[in-house]
Image (cartoon, rainbow, N blue to C red):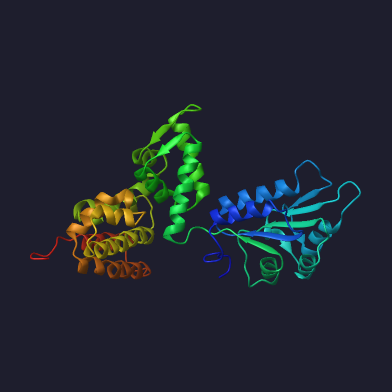
Amino acid sequence: MAGSPRGEGPWGGRALADVAARLRKGWPAGLTVLFGDDLYHLDRALGMILDHLVPDRADSFAWTVLGDAPVAAGALVAQARATGMFASRRVVFLRDVATLEGEPEPLIEFAKSPPREGFIVVRAPKLDRKRKLHKALAEAGTTLTFRAPANRREEDELRVEATAMARERGLAVGRDALEMLLAVCGVDLQRIVGELDKLRTWSGVTPGATFEIDAAAVRDIAAGDELMTGWELADALLERNREKAVVLARRLVDSGQEPIKVVGGLAYRARTLIEAKALAARGMSAEEVASRQGGAWFFKAALSAGMERYSLAEALAMPGRLLAADRAFKSRAIDKGAVLEATVAQLTAPAPKGRR
């Protein structure tokens, strides 16, 4: 798929470690392309490679930075081949792949037969392999892929790294705070770093000291009001609190939130509840279920309530109702806010008498 690194190579944290190991042996001449949606590790790797190739960034004879204006592939290669009397190594860094134009042949030839000390480094988070030029970038030289975590094991590795980042800033984050932070930022480490910096400033922690961050601090400092209202609505759904859920749904619509996005958040909670009910059927406690599901940890109290208040059949019916709402949003004749409120009211309706 164009521009998507999902499933290609190791996730960004491991890819960065691979780059560090390769740099200890030197870096091959030719074309290097850094690609992927994990921009945090991509940019760290980029910095390491450039530090290795160009120790003195002020040496204009050793390297050239392009990307502020359109540049032809042939001109890019010509720059990399133009070694002079003042520097034995020539490095050309293209910081924006969107500015690259022309036919790919010069890049392909350069990658096949580069000068002994000639290097082209391209920062290309998104590549469209349907384009000849981008396809050549992805395949001709050394392509380093930095993708976001795609499974539970990789997400656990990200949790370890995020905890270490917090520690470097004098912050101690507990499990609840960490899961809340990941719920706010997803697996975007660049955003996690930004929120940790914000929390460090808020804490006023002094050098050498440690400040303990709890979920309430993350909630107040890192999460916006609209996002928190969405979480509260999802909690109300799991708690089967019809009156609260309808009020929160109305508040989100009144604030300008797109109902389809709200339904997306509810769909995630519905899937979590279905998985939790299945795990509970295998004998797991609510605490074990929340721990097993990782991202469910910060709303484990609401999840526990949902496991008690919904039958498995009722949980299994939730995705179908949410899908029906999604389809109704596509009709211009129906008020989207009314659809959302009606859907939430249906999902949180009192349990039938005699339900087991």
Q: In this view, does 207 lie above or below 322?
A: above
What residue is shown at x 22% (from left), y 57% (from top)? 306
Q: Judge by depth and name the residue closer to the eye, 219 or 119.
A: 119
Q: Judge by depth and name the residue closer to the eye, 99 or 16.
A: 16
In the picture, residue 107 is in which quadrant? bottom right
114 with respect to 313 (left or right): right
Instruction: Name the quadrant of the N terminus.
Output: bottom right
Q: In this view, does 151 lie above or below 225?
A: below
Q: Position of residue 66 (x, y in %)?
A: 75, 53
What residue is shown at x 58% (from left), y 69% (from top)? 2
Instruction: Name the quadrant of the C terminus.
Output: bottom left
Q: Position of residue 17 (x, y in %)?
A: 59, 53
Q: Position of residue 263 (x, y in %)?
A: 34, 61
What residue is shown at x 14% (from left), y 62% (from top)? 351
In the picture as drawn, the residue positioned furthest to the front comes out as 25
Is residue 246 visible in this depiction of the protein? no
320 with respect to 143 (left or right): left
In the picture, residue 77 is in which quadrant? bottom right
